[in-house]
Each structure stands twice: as C-alpha cells, then as structure tokens.
Image: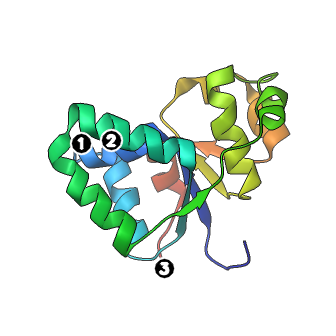
Amino acid sequence: MSSSKNVIFLDTNVILSALFSAEQPASVILNYFIDGKFKVAISQHVLEEVIHNIKLKLPKALPVFQNLLINVPPVIVENPSFEEIVEWSMVIKLEDAGILAAAIAVRADFLITGDGHFFENAEIAVKSGLRIVTPSQFLETFKPA
C-alpha cells in the first residue's frame, strides 16, 4: 500500500470489542480510524466473522457496522490461499494462520488482536515481520497527529 498512513490490520475480536463497549481501547482505535488517523485492513474472513457475531450477540449494532462499512470502509483483503494458511500454521494455530497471512499480505504495520495465541510464540512476530499488539499496547505506542 503506498501511503504515508499506517495500515492497521484488525482481528475480529478487536472490532467486536469496539462495538460492544465504547469504554474499550478497541473503541478508541476504531474512532481514530473513523477520524482518518490510519488505514484499517481486514480480511473477508474477519468481515464475515464480525457480521456473524453481531447478528448472534448484538443485532442492534448491525446497522451501525453497516454504516461504518459504507462511510469509512476498511481495506478488505481476500482470504489467503490454502498454501499460505498451511505455511503460517507451522508457527501458529491453524485457525489463526489465516489472520496472520492476511495481515502479511496487506503489508500491515500493526496486527491488533486480543487473541493470546499471537503472543505465545515470539517466532510469530519475528517470522511475519509484523508488530503484533493488543489494543492497549497499540494505544501506548500510537500518537495521533
């Protein structure tokens, strides 16, 4: 992506946290995105997971999320290939390998997640070249212009 703005890849749990509670660090991150402080990327899989979970757990938030997608759309990347997922499943659980591969494919500056599996093995960040952080850790390092 050719832009001076950081590209932030959001995991499903971060988006859901932002929608469930305005008090969460994830909500601050979402508001920074809406204000144009950085670009957000998600995969098609993340989008589908978010919509599925909203419908199940917080159906009243669906119009809010749809409005966000229309007015401030994130970069939506294709799901990684089976081969890419298998490759990254050597360092992280198979169900998380697709998130990691998608974040790498979009050349994200940060992968923001609340999933502890991404932090269990330091090799994940080293091999992927990503800065993998929780929402709170991201807010400690990101200073909006």
Contact flag, marks 1 and 2 (Cβ < 8 Å): yes
Q: Residue furthest left?
A: 60
Q: Residues within 10 Å of mark 1 (few under 14, many from 20)?
A: some
Q: CA distance from mark 2 to mark 3?
A: 24 Å
Q: Is residue 22 visible?
A: no
Question: Where does label 1 land, which residue?
Answer: 20
Q: Quadrant of residue 79?
A: top right
Label 2 or label 3, whichever lies nearer to me, is 2
Give coordinates of residue 105: x percent, y percent: 75, 53
Front residue of 72 and 111: 72
- Give the structural element (helix, strand or loop) at label 3: loop
Contact flag, marks 2 and 3 (Cβ < 8 Å): no
Above or below for 88 versus 3: above
Task: Name the N-terminal-most of marks 2 and 3.
Answer: 2
- Give the structural element (helix, strand or loop) at label 2: helix
* Residue type at the position of mark 2: Ser
Q: Quadrant of residue 91?
A: top right
* Residue type at the position of mark 3: Ala
Label at residue 17: 2
Please tell me which residue is depicted at 52% across the width and 39% down the height of the picture.
113
